[in-house]
Amino acid sequence: MKKLPEHFIFGGASAAYQAEGATKEGGKGPVAWDEFLEKQGRFLADPASDFYHKYPEDLELCSMFGINGIRISIAWSRIFPQGRGEVNRKGVEYYHDLLKEAKKRNIKVFVTLHHFDTPKALFDQGDFLNRDTIDAFVAYAQFCFEEFPEVEYWTTFNEIYPIATNQYLLGIFPPGIKYDLTKVIACLHNMMVAHAKVVNLFKESGFHGEIGVVHSLETKYPASNSPEDMHAAFLDDALSIRFLLDATYKGRYSKETLEALDEICQANDAVYDFPEADLLELEKAKDRNDYLGINHYQSHFVKAYNGENAIHHNGTGDKGTGSYKVKGIGERIYKEGLERTDWDWIIYPEGLYDLLLRIKKDYPNYKAIYITENGMGYKDEFKDGIIMDKPRIDYIKKYMSALADAIEAGVNVKGYFLWSLMDVFSWSNGYNKRYGLFFVDFETQKRYPKESAYWYKQLAETKTLL
Ligand code: NOJ
């Protein structure tokens, strides 16, 4: 029997574009996704979970099921339809109302400023590859800090690495560019600079509350003990984990990170440039993060690979169709005997434990950690309002148990947000990949608690993993 701490947050996570729907309502400005999804013709972000109108009902469900924290994001283009300039008061009021409703119910709210949804006007000018976007982001953040003093927990960005790679390596996010490592690195770096600038502004202006960033950190292991595989795992880790944690907590890129970067760039004819002024900004912010948010779903096993880039993203849930081979880095393989989801995500809770202990050791100034996303994409079966999602319960149980062990070993983890609170729209899968504690009938928008919601409730009440 394992226990979680007394004041732990048992939360549920969501994001504006995936939950709100109403993409053209209330004066919201466009984002690149609107057009990208229309052209793709598979699914749209309307209606999503209609959180724009249904949030009181979802918060009521939180209260009923012991959920004492939620993650939401502010849609930048609801506040500034063109990314900067004129403010849309209707959008501002919507978030005030939502925050008020949560406060009434004693639900802590973690607010992300950017969850994959740069306003189209800025996106079309290069998104974060264009340094002007950094300034627009800082101005938007400042506006939010002044406008929403009721927010206690701010997050600058959600998942910088998946943004950079899905946009410029896998090409599954707009603008759909593949295998461009120069753009991947520039995007990673510029977003980290934007994060640091916002953190510095927040602390220097004395705004109320806490601030942090959410990184997607998926542990890398070598596929075997051969020096080649160990090196491949090191390279994959350097680009996806070390780069971001160095920038966040060391305020510079370490020698090992830069060596890995040079090797990756050489193989891909890529280049990078990190101006001195940027590094000073990172350096100033490194001890000012109040917490680190970690999104963690899976681990990767990496094998040496010398061929051309070849990635196939499994965005349909057809198990076994995914493949990932990157020139100058390595190939991610499936390990015999390890479970994986229909989307080929390897279930390996030890990966979370190892990751947390590594952060404690290598980045001791992390202060506090929240698991801001973890959960299982699953094709839930709906039978007369009953949803028996046992595999999801098993998944959460295993990961929470690893988490409890890490806390026991001295890592300061203060909360867990299951992805997702209710079923939401998925960027590359649409509506068939469900994660929620609450099943959403996307036609009627009716909510139904799944078996996992009842399980989560008893966990939140007893703080005991049975
Ligand atoms: C991470 C992202 O933050 C979220 O938007 C996404 O839907 C989940 N992972 C599941 O893939």
Image (cartoon, grey):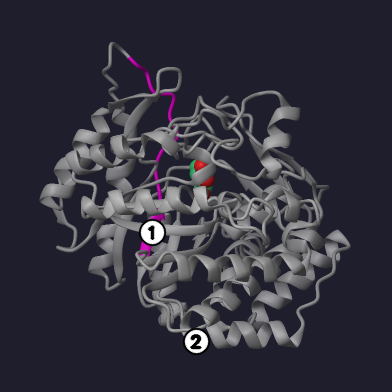
Task: Describe residue 105's horizontal placement relative to residue 357 as left or right.
Answer: left
> In the image, which disc is placed on residue 303?
none
The number of numbered badges drawn on the structure is: 2
Q: Which of 83 and 246 is in front in this view?
A: 83
Using the image, tell me which numbered label, if any, was put on residue 110: 1
**Tag 1, which secondary structure?**
strand
Residue farthest top in this picture: 384
Q: Is residue 323 left or right of residue 398?
A: right
* Residue drawn at 67 percent across, 40 percent down: 33
Image position, residue 357 (x, y; %): 38, 69
**Of the pair 160 and 44, the residue shown nearer to us:** 44
Where residue 64 appears, as percent x and y from the top left, is 18, 39
Q: Say what amino acid the circle numbered 1 marks.
A: Phe
Looking at the image, which residue is at 73% across and 36% down?
Answer: 36
Under circle 2, the secondary element is helix
In the image, the residue with mark 1 has its CB under 8 Å from the nearest atom of ligand 1: no
Name which residue type carries label 2. Answer: Glu
Residue 347 falls left or right of residue 228: left
Discs 1, 2 touching: Cβ within 8 Å: no
Near-viewer residue (219 or 165): 165
Q: Position of residue 431 (x, y in %)?
A: 52, 26
Q: Where is residue 237 in the image (x, y as percent from the top left)?
A: 60, 63
Image quarter for residue 440? top left
Q: Is residue 216 at least partly visible in the picture? A: no
Magenta residues? 370-382
Residue 204's disc number: 2
